[in-house]
Image: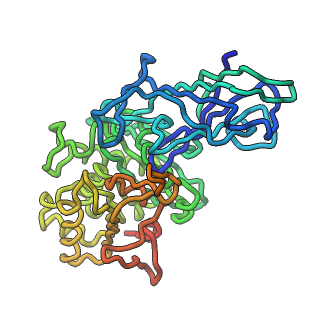
Amino acid sequence: MSRGYYTLTRVTDYGPYVTKVILPVPGSVKAEETLPEKFSVYVERMDEKGDALLLPKSWMARDDREPSRGYIPVLAAYPSDIEGNRADAGEFVTLETAYGPMTQLSSRISAPNGLNVYVKMRYTVTQTAKLESDAGALGGLCWDYPLGDFCPDAEGFLNSTSSYAPEPLNYGYFVPQTPGEKHPLIVWLHGAGEGGVDATIAYTANKVTAFAGEKIQKSFGGAYILVPQTKTFWMNDGSGQYGQSGKSMYVEALKACIDEFVEKNPAVDRSRIYIGGDSNGGFMTMRMILDYPDFFAAAFPVCEALYDGTITDEALEKIVHLPIWFTHAKNDPVVKPETTVEATYRRLIDAGARNVHFTFWPKIEDIHEGFRGPDGKPFEYLGHFAWIPVFNDDCRLDYDGRPVTADGKEVSLLEWLSMQTK
């Protein structure tokens, strides 16, 4: 008999993955009855027509494609409530399934046409051995149509659109639930792959939702989060092509979006507006502080892609006063640090900047998710993925390898950011 199922999506360091499949069962099942080997899980990722997607095999091999379908290992099984919370007995059985960079079939997103989108996923879960329940022995059950998806990491985020007529921008946002008259605002600018028309992508394709987590919110005393989305990419200077002009057609539209959000939220502390972003968004972070050098309290560009040669000495002088913390990886194959961040950082220091820092990772390895590579060692991400340690607040060392300090104590990037004010 065909039955429906629920899924649970978690926003990981490598993007959003289905980590649990939640199965309603006819009767209450006890824990000792729910063994992983009693279930088989098959998934297809499909286009709007229902055909299996032909998707890139890896982030760098965009043209090497294969049908996105197959079996996924079941790691654990247990009785639960409808949201997948473990119980001693229950009328739901939750399956924890494999996910991560070595199991892309579990990913909620892909980029079939260059931009990340949420893909349709259909699971077929088959019972392969009997389950004993208070309603008797259960056998031959199959779950093959979705009933809904839970994503606790994105709770509290809402989507909207700015009203700037020439170029309205979609955006996601989070309103802090912490008491207080005023709260800072963190503006995050997404990378090139997160452009498009679904603002949810802008804060879940990478783990921007971490900014709304308890630890980081507590550090800031509660912070608003604004995540604008461009329909194309921030580096678009109007030509529709990636180039080295250093210009963006979205500067005025982005500033209008930020201004409008601040106006709509009078509890935003205008002396504590911070801006950061990764890759294309790192480029746009630099573009915004150069064009509005006195608006932001601090900036944290990540693997930023603004060519240093496009920044004049006069423009650089205008941001010498601004607190900035750069993050990049030495082995970044996408944005070469020697032509972007390294040169700009050195020029700022030479120009007299006193509150500018630069965490320069030798490589980006997994230290939080437990992801493993084929060799069994911690998974090594592409060197471009320097946003991962930022969202985990792992950045603590400066360009010289020494800890960054503020007010006489060692601080992380986000601790430092929370201390900055105009």
Residue 77 sits above or below residue 410 on the image: above
Q: Nearer the viewer, residue 268 or 153?
A: 153
Q: How many numbered discs sit on the rendered protein?
A: 0
Left or right of residue 204, residue 87 in this image: right
Q: Is residue 87 left or right of residue 402?
A: right
Q: As displayed, is residue 327 above or below residue 346? A: above
Is there any visible trace of residue 266 in the rendered image? no
In the picture provided, is 389 more to the left or to the right than 154?
A: left
User: Which quadrant, please, contains the C terminus?
Assistant: bottom left
206 or 27, which lies in front?
27
State the residue lying farthest toward the front.
375
Quadrant showing the N terminus: top right
Please tell me in which quadrant of the rendered image residue 89 appears.
Answer: top right
Q: Residue at x 13, y 49 (%)?
A: 245
**In the image, 365: left or right of 176?**
left
Give the image location of residue 39, x and y in percent. Answer: 66, 30
Q: Is residue 347 shown to the viewer in this render?
A: yes
Which residue occupies the foreground of this view, 224 or 30? 30
